[in-house]
């Protein structure tokens, strides 16, 4: 059974969906540990309530990335818990190449838009304000860029005429909760074949 490590900075509803899907048997995985860069993250509370080891690890003083020494602590924690796949779930920091090399092809992220449209922060609002008719959610591997890694699963969400950015974000979030676990399950089954930018989903045996 694959061991997951989740990095989360905030509410942790994607983490909760993973916890729930493991409990219900939809997802054949085990949570090794949860790490947050925010001591007040609700994600930490959710993890503790489910009996998953949960840690706040100080990210250092920079706002957008983990300082090198701190990043080593994150890596050590993940390794101590024998994490095989790292799931970023609303983790608000960029990871450096050492981290990426150590966990090569074993870090994935969920993004609330259909990449490569609307990368970066507030993607749901970006799509809404742009006037997009269709947006959605993307699960992708992490590479050196911001929201640029090879795409694993995408699912569309239509923008309604009477939408608000908030209503749209809520519908996207529901889709995120589904496709993140689907992608993790495919990874766990060894069904993701990555060639360059392309990720093929192979048939189950
Ligand atoms: C989600 O919209 C996710 O796509 C984005 O950050 C948000 C995290 O939400 N990267 P939650 O903390 O999982 O509720």
Image (cartoon, helix red, strand yellow):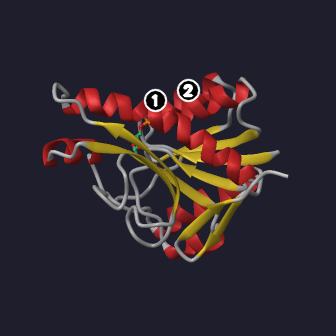
Q: In this view, does 119 lie to the left or right of 70?
A: left
Q: Residue at x 69, y 27 (%)?
A: 51
Q: Classify mark 1 as within 8 Å of ligand 1 or not, answering yes or no.
A: yes
Image spot of residue 109 (x, y percent): 50, 53
Mark 2: few, some, or many residues within 10 Å (few <14, many ≥20)? some
Q: What element carries label 2?
A: helix
Q: Name the residue under label 1.
A: 42
Q: Residue at x 40, y 70 (%)?
A: 145
Q: Residue 95 carries which label?
A: none
Camera-side residue: 86 or 79? 86
Image spot of residue 47 (x, y percent): 60, 31
State which image quarter holds ligand 1. top left
Q: Name the residue under label 2.
A: 46
Regarding residue 60, the answer to whether it shows in the image is yes
Vertical placement of residue 112 versus 160, above or below = below
Camera-side residue: 85 or 163? 163
Q: Residue at x 48, y 30 (%)?
A: 13
Vertical placement of residue 18 versus 197, above or below = above
Hey, which quadrant is residue 93 in on the image?
bottom left
Q: Circles 2 and 1: CB distance less than 8 Å?
A: yes
Count of marks, rendered view = 2
Q: Is mark 1 on a helix, strand or loop?
A: helix
Q: Which residue is drawn at 51% across and 64% down?
A: 142
């Amino acid at each position: 059974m694959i061991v997951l490590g989740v990095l989360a900075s905030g509410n942790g509803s994607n983490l909760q969906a993973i916890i729930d899907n493991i409990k219900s048997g939809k997802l054949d995985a085990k949570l090794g540990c949860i790490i947050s860069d925010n001591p007040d993250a609700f994600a930490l509370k959710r993890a503790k309530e489910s009996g998953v080891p949960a840690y706040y690890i100080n990210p250092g003083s920079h706002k957008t990335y983990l300082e090198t020494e701190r990043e080593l602590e994150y890596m050590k924690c993940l390794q101590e818990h024998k994490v095989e796949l790292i799931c970023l779930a609303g983790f608000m920091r960029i990871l450096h190449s050492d981290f990426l090399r150590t966990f090569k092809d074993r870090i994935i992220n969920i993004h609330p838009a259909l990449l490569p449209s609307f990368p970066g922060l507030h993607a749901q609002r970006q799509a809404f304000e742009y006037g997009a008719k269709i947006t959605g959610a993307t699960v992708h591997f992490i590479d050196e860029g911001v929201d640029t890694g090879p795409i694993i699963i995408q699912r569309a969400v239509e923008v309604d005429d009477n939408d608000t950015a908030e209503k749209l974000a809520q519908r996207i979030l529901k889709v995120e909760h589904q496709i993140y676990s689907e992608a993790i399950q495919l990874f766990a089954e060894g069904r993701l074949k990555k060639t360059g930018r392309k990720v093929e989903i192979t048939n189950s045996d």
